[in-house]
Image (tube, rainbow, N blue to C red):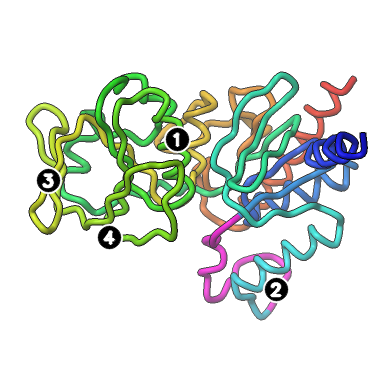
Amino acid sequence: MEVKMKNLFEYLKEMYDIIIIGAGPAGISASLYAKRANMNVLVIYKGTSNLENATKIENYYGFPDGITGQDLYNSGIMQAKNLGVDFRVSEVTSIEYQQDGFNVKTPENEYNAKSVIISTGNKKLKPNIKGINEFEGKGISYCAICDGFFYRNKKVAVIGSGEFAFSEAKMLSNVVKDITILTNGEQIKSVRNNFKINTKKIKKIVGSEKVEKIVFEDLTEIDIDGIFIALGEAGANDFAKTLGIITENDNIKVNENMETNVPGVFACGNITGGLLQVSKAVYEGSKAGLSAVKYVKEIKK
């Protein structure tokens, strides 16, 4: 009984009203407005924000002598923590529907929420490999859940070396006949899930009408039916594809309230396009936070 009660406590502890993915100015702004509305809020983030790379910001309100991007970034996170917002430093590998909201997965845990705000910025990483552009849509894909079905019982590869690559490979393993993770020269610490790993540097991708072979720098090659790109972390566009969110020119399409076409999912910041400035991100974050609060209150009634 004690173990069951502990498991139940752990489960309940991981349930939130709103989960925000990304800790840049848009995500933090959303968290502040949501928390002040008495919501149970979690921010999950990993890696660097574009804001951290700004040497000095002199066009943002309230800093007469300017401020470094790193200082502004850290101050925002500290402000949210002081207000009581929960944080997890981890990589979100997927967002999935569930009966009463959404399930957000990281390598270490799963979290449940009634609403999700995507504020990861617009990161679509593409390897500098000859043939990538030529064969996009002709054997090269960026979404396992979207295109995996077309490669059932075939031989595919996933290019990547992080948690996102392993997550995509795991999803594909239920469909394809043979799968190999290609790290393109990157070394990984361990082999997980019994996936085949090839760490050779890739020279080029070749084929006629579609992908047929991968050639490595040592001139060895493998026959392949399809290639899935999964570099770095899963980004906003990856989440959009799996959830069926409408995008336009690689940006998530939202209305004036930062709502996507999927009820309960909101987006803000660089991923919505337009002016790529802190002021715009903060404004959209506040709108997204308030809209998510309204949505959660309505479904709680």
Q: Earlier in the sequence, mark 1 or mark 4?
A: 1
Magenta part of the chain = 46-64
Viewer-side residue, 210 vs 153: 153
- On screen, residue 218 versus residue 157, left or right, reads left
In what element is the residue under mark 3? Answer: strand
Which amino acid is tagged 3?
Glu
- On screen, residue 202 versus residue 153, left or right, reads left
In what element is the residue under mark 4? Answer: loop
Quadrant of the rendering where the C terminus is positioned: top right
What is the x, y in percent for residue 228?
32, 37
Which amino acid is tagged 2?
Phe
Report if the CB atoms under discs 3 and 2 are less than 8 Å apart. Answer: no
Task: Find residue 63 and name its label.
Answer: 2
- Decide whether the magenta segment is chiefly helix, strand or loop: loop
What is the x, y in percent for residue 67?
64, 75
Quadrant of the rendering where the N terminus is positioned: top right
Residue placed under numbered mark 4 in the picture: 185
